[in-house]
């Protein structure tokens, strides 16, 4: 009898742990078409950022300014309220670029992507893909009726080393400004590498054998990554994104000591006390070109990248209700 109780307890704990970690959807949500997102537009942005405007690392300030100007111009085309958030690090000037839609006050949704690179590299997936997605979200928002809540799209600078995990990160500056103003943030979505997919068995890797057993071995999905305690927002984003035709979406809520959980701009919103998740193709756990000269535009899958953007757009709609 005691042994049976132990076994039952183990099974129950295992089930709860699996449910808490992976946020399974027990039913497939209603389907939403991704036809509004144009893969060719995403590709144009990635080519512009990774080939024409690079290098985009912290030492090439003139290029970072050119990138910021390009993002600002694209934002302005959508009819958004566009502004810059300049700041200084070690005597040098950098800037975030911000586009706002909907009300001018009240609760807000924040969606961000960093436009700098880790060294003088193309950075097509990391993170021209995320910025391209951000620009396409702005285009979609500009074509729709104004959202019910303030939606703020932010292109961050200085996410990469040597400023990663410092107050020099553009997202740190932005998150702190929101907290200092006591702004109520419904959620923050960090768009971090969304263009690399691989259908081969064994193409997807994980930091532990347990995760390897719980998730697919093929890198053909997008991941929604949240911290412990943000399970509800993770599940809501995952459910909304899963409505997109043909898009495979998995999620994880895990402590930050698991490598990769806090490896992007969402960490600064967590530290500011906000709920945040990362939408990602899982970076170095899938893409062998991560932080190398081989992270180039032709290696990305723009059709599936368009599905991801459509999924995020659906999630924005659900979160703003």
Image: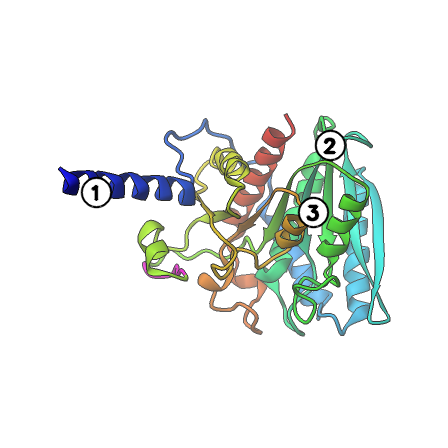
Residue 225 versus residue 178: which sits nearer the camera? 178
Instruction: State left or right for residue 37 relative to residue 13.
Output: right
Magenta: main secondary structure: loop
Above or below, comparing residue 233 to residue 96 in the picture: above
Q: Which mark is residue 107?
A: 2
Instruction: State left or right for residue 281 relative to residue 186.
Output: left
Question: Residues at badges 1 and 2 in contact (C-beta under 8 Å)?
Answer: no
Can you tell which of label 3 and label 2 is closer to the viewer? 2
Above or below, comparing residue 318 to residue 269 in the picture: above
Above or below, comparing residue 110 to residue 31 in the picture: below
Q: Earlier in the sequence, mark 1 or mark 2?
A: 1
Q: Earlier in the sequence, mark 1 or mark 3?
A: 1
Residue 286 showing in the rendered view: no
Give the CA distance from mark 1 to mark 3.
53 Å
Residue corresponding to mark 3: 135
Q: Earlier in the sequence, mark 3 or mark 2?
A: 2
Residue 153 inside the magenta-drawn segment: no
Instruction: State left or right for residue 222 relative to residue 276.
Output: left
Q: Residues within 10 Å of mark 1 (few under 14, many from 20)?
A: few
């Amino acid at each position: 009898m005691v042994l049976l109780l132990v076994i039952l307890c183990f099974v129950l704990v295992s089930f709860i742990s699996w449910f808490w970690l992976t946020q399974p959807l027990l039913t497939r949500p209603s389907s939403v078409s991704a036809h509004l997102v144009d893969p060719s537009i995403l590709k144009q942005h990635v080519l512009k950022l990774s080939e024409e405007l690079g290098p985009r690392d912290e030492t090439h300030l003139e290029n970072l300014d050119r990138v910021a100007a390009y993002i600002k111009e694209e934002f302005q085309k959508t009819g958004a309220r566009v502004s810059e958030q300049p700041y200084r690090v070690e005597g040098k000037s950098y800037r975030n670029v911000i586009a706002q839609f909907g009300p001018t006050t009240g609760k807000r949704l924040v969606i961000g992507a960093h436009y700098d690179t880790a060294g003088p590299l193309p950075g097509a997936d990391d993170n021209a893909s995320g910025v391209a997605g951000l620009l396409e979200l702005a285009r979609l928002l500009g074509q729709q009726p104004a959202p019910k809540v303030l939606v703020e799209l932010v292109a961050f600078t200085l996410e990469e080393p040597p400023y990663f995990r410092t107050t020099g990160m553009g997202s740190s500056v932005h998150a702190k400004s929101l907290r200092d103003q006591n702004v109520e943030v419904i959620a923050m979505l960090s768009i971090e590498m969304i263009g690399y997919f691989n259908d081969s068995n064994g193409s997807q890797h994980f930091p532990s054998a347990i995760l390897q057993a719980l998730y697919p071995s093929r890198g053909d999905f997008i991941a929604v990554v949240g911290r412990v305690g943000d399970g509800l927002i993770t599940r809501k984003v995952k459910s909304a994104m899963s409505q997109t035709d043909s898009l495979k979406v998995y999620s994880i809520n895990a402590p930050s000591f698991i490598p990769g959980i806090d490896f992007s701009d969402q960490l600064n919103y967590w530290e500011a006390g906000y709920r945040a998740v990362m939408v990602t193709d899982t970076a170095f756990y899938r893409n062998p070109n991560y932080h190398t000269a081989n992270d180039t535009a032709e290696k990305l899958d723009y059709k599936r990248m368009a599905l991801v953007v459509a999924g995020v757009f659906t999630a924005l709609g659900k979160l703003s209700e």
